[in-house]
Image (spheres, grey):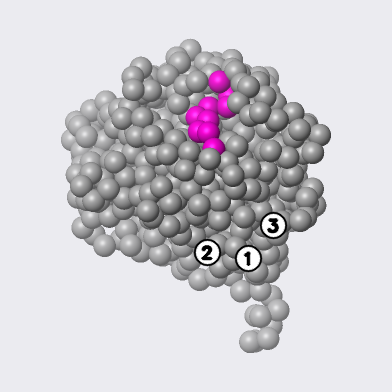
Amino acid sequence: MQQPETLSLDRAAMRPAYDVVVVGSGYGGGIAASRLARAGQRVCVLERGREVPVGGFPSRMPELRRELQVHSGNKRSGSGTGLYDVRLGSDINVVVGCGLGGGSLINAGVALRPDARVFADHAWPDAIRDDGLLDLGFARAADMLRPTRYAGAPELTKYRALEAASGVFGKAPVTAPITVSFDDVVNPAGLEQRACTLCGDCCSGCNVGAKNSVAVTYLADAKMHGAEIFTELSVSHVEKLSGGWRVHFRPTADGGEAATVDAKTVFLGAGTLGSTEILLRSRERGLGTSDRLGMGFSANGDIIAFALGGKNRANAVGVGEPPKFTEDPVGTSVAGQIELPDDDDLNASMIIQEGTMPSSVAPLLPVFFIAGGRLLGAAQSLIKGVYKGPLSHLQSFFCVSHDDALGRLVLKDDAIAVDWPDVAKQDVYARVDDALTKAAEFVGGRYIKNPLSATNMGSKPATAHPLGGCGMGETAETGTVNHKCQVFASATGEETHAGLYVCDGSVMPRSLGCNPLLTISALAERAMVHFARDHNLGFDTEPIRPQAELEATA
């Protein structure tokens, strides 16, 4: 098969009805589209963001500003298709991706399986542990996303800086499995990918084409198997019909006219905020759901923080493509991590990863740290740049742990909002603050919890890994969806809506304590196996072979 130049179609090509409509195009939505297209279903994908080609991601500050949309309640600044979607809340701030490929476009690509004790928690339906398909889900997700531990990571400057800080814990770092290709390859979707250049810009979008995002894996595979993909269309709600579903949407750009598309089956994969918002709006219009809808929101114990003024050079600012600095390779956004499991208390476990700020953010870093008076001599960085001045010693920490998942997602003025008044008092934040303070001081630096405190981001907790809101449960009394990701149809019992599913981070009934992409993918793959069995369908998971290889074996 020949790879498509673009994945998305013009809106005018949309049919009035399909077998399946998939809402959202992140890990859950991409997997549903790929597997169901392979099963011979007529699949339509609706994505609120736009398709961004390789080379089209922001590499400079003005481009980054154009990719920023900030929501406060139902008010928005910036384009509704900006890659970075920041939700400012009264209790916690949330950052999610917006584009064809969802959060995979701008995440660090760290693919971890949670501690086994996470799935032992009875917050999960028993079948998750008992039917044997979870391992298959993880295996299939890994086959497509191909996480790899970069062999040269321990030689990177920022990895060595993490190694120095790890001494305070008596636990050396390990390389992190990253969904990035380190060699020129033809991937399982049949697309050619260039090798990673170690530029460090994973979190602003890979302009090399080395990142194994959903766009170049599952969505490309879905397209190859006949799925029709449409972008810049935002779904408001779903409506139950006598023989299926009607999906209501309008153009993401302000002022567009509302429209609909029908399907026998709908998979919501719009992310924790998006899928929950769609179901809450649908419930307001009469759709039966569990009373648990919106409950169980988790920030996954996220903290992003910094160590400043340490004695070790960190080289933790991306250089972009083409590179803005060539003397020292940066590496992937995350290359190493310190794993700190607590044998006695799962919820006290944490993972500390060294992070990289994208090159497009580089001009802002001196401004942030000067504004707070936190770094003596930071003005030198305005002259020397972040690659040689004091900020070349800036260490970034991405930490994931566990919270109590007691947040609630609600509609306020028809927009999703997080209601979690005491979130800042969670034990996890004090525990992680203490650990990172010790790590920073151990290398002669100072721990900076929030360089954005002087901005409208404020000093509230923030997360890039929102989970929950449509959590799994045995029955409607304990969850919004069942173990197959089917939506419960009422406040009690096990009855589900025929043909309505949720496959994304919203189905997690608790925190994961690690980057969630692999778990979201595994549960979506598992749901696809159940869907195929329930509907007497079949699909293979074989990689697409390049045309030259097919001709050679013909």
20 or 211: nearer the viewer: 211
Image depth: mark 3 or mark 2 in front: 3
* Tag 1: amino acid: Phe
* Tag 3: amino acid: Pro
| Residue drawn at (33%, 62%) of the image | 135
Which sits earlier in the primary sequence, circle 1 or circle 3? 1
Instruction: Specify whether residue 403 is in view.
Output: yes
Which sits earlier in the primary sequence, circle 3 or circle 2? 2
The magenta segment is: 445-453
Which sits earlier in the primary sequence, circle 1 or circle 2? 2
The label shown at residue 101 is none
Which residue in the protein does label 1 denote?
182
The quadrant holding residue 461 is top left
92 or 527: nearer the viewer: 92
Residue 416: give x, y in percent of width and height.
46, 22
- Find the distance from the CA under tag 3 to the CA under tag 2: 18 Å
The crowding category of the residue bearing disc 1, from other C-alpha atoms within 10 Å (few below 14, some 14 to 19, many at least 20), is some
Which residue in the protein does label 3 denote?
329
Image depth: mark 1 or mark 3 in front: 3
Residue 274: give x, y in percent of width and height.
48, 32
Residue 53: give x, y in percent of width and height.
72, 49
| Residue drawn at (68%, 47%) of the image | 318
Classify 334 as above or below 498: below
* Tag 2: amino acid: Thr
| Residue drawn at (56%, 45%) of the image | 355
Tell me the chief SS of the magenta region. loop
Q: Residue furthest bottom?
A: 553
The label shown at residue 148 is 2
- Find the distance from the CA under tag 1 to the CA under tag 3: 14 Å
Question: Is there CB contact under 8 Å for labels 1 and 2?
Answer: yes
Left or right: 553, with 36 as reference point: right
